[in-house]
Amino acid sequence: MRLRALRGAITVPANDADAILEATDELVRAVMERNALGADDMVSCIFTVTDDLDAEFPAVAARRLGLDTVPLLCTREIAVPGSMPRVVRLLLHCYAQPETEVAHVYLRDAVGLRRDLEGAQ
């Protein structure tokens, strides 16, 4: 097995706890499905949010998905002028077979963040 890092992002329609949890749930599920991951494959996950999202911790959604043994951390993204608003990002560290291609996942308007990653949408 090899330690891998997966990236992902999703936009959130409003600074609302339910909206943040719903978007994070969608993102984490998509990353897990596209990479055939279970909680036992995960080492840790870092969530970042833009400054305009503070109604809830994204890690709450991951815990609700059963990732209670995975170390999770929430932090703020750097507030760069003109950057995309209301974005939850993740950096997931996991174990995978060396020959396995990783699938980064960018959803909703966040697809515009990494158009260079073919198949990430």
Image (cartoon, grey):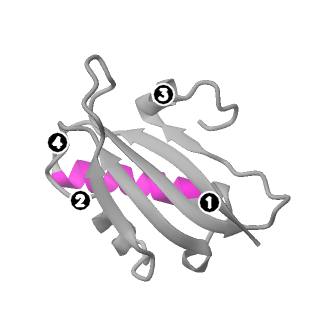
Q: Which label sits in the foreground, 3 or 4?
A: 3
In the picture shown, does residue 87 fall above or below 83?
below
Q: Which residue is mark 4?
A: 15
In the rendered image, the residue lying farthest to the top is: 82
Q: CA distance from mark 3 to mark 2?
A: 22 Å
In this picture, residue 51 sits left or right of residue 112 = left
Q: What's under tag 3, amino acid-wise?
A: Leu
Per the image, is 21 magenta? yes
Left/right of residue 7 with respect to residue 12 in the rendered view: right
Residue type at numbered disc 4: Asn
Q: Residue at left 29%, top 17%?
A: 82
Residue 38: say if magenta. no
Q: Earlier in the sequence, mark 4 or mark 1?
A: 4
- Identify the residue under disc 2: 57
Q: Secondary structure at mark 2?
A: loop
User: Mark 3 or mark 2, which has the lower sequence index?
Assistant: 2
Q: Residue 98's spot in the image, x, y percent?
A: 82, 62
| Foreground tag (1 vs 2) | 2
- Do callouts 4 and 2 mark residues in contact (Cβ within 8 Å)? no
Give the magenta part as a residue range.
17-31
For residue 93, which quarter of the picture?
Answer: bottom right
Q: Nearer the viewer, residue 78 or 22?
A: 78
Q: Amino acid at mark 1?
A: Glu
Which quadrant would residue 5 be assigned to in this image?
Answer: bottom right
Label 1 to label 2: alpha-carbon separation: 22 Å
> Which residue lies at the image location 25% right of the left edge and 48% below the top edge?
19
Please name the residue that numbered disc 1 is placed on: 33
Give the foreground label among 3 and 1: 3
Mark 1 vs 2, N-terminal side: 1
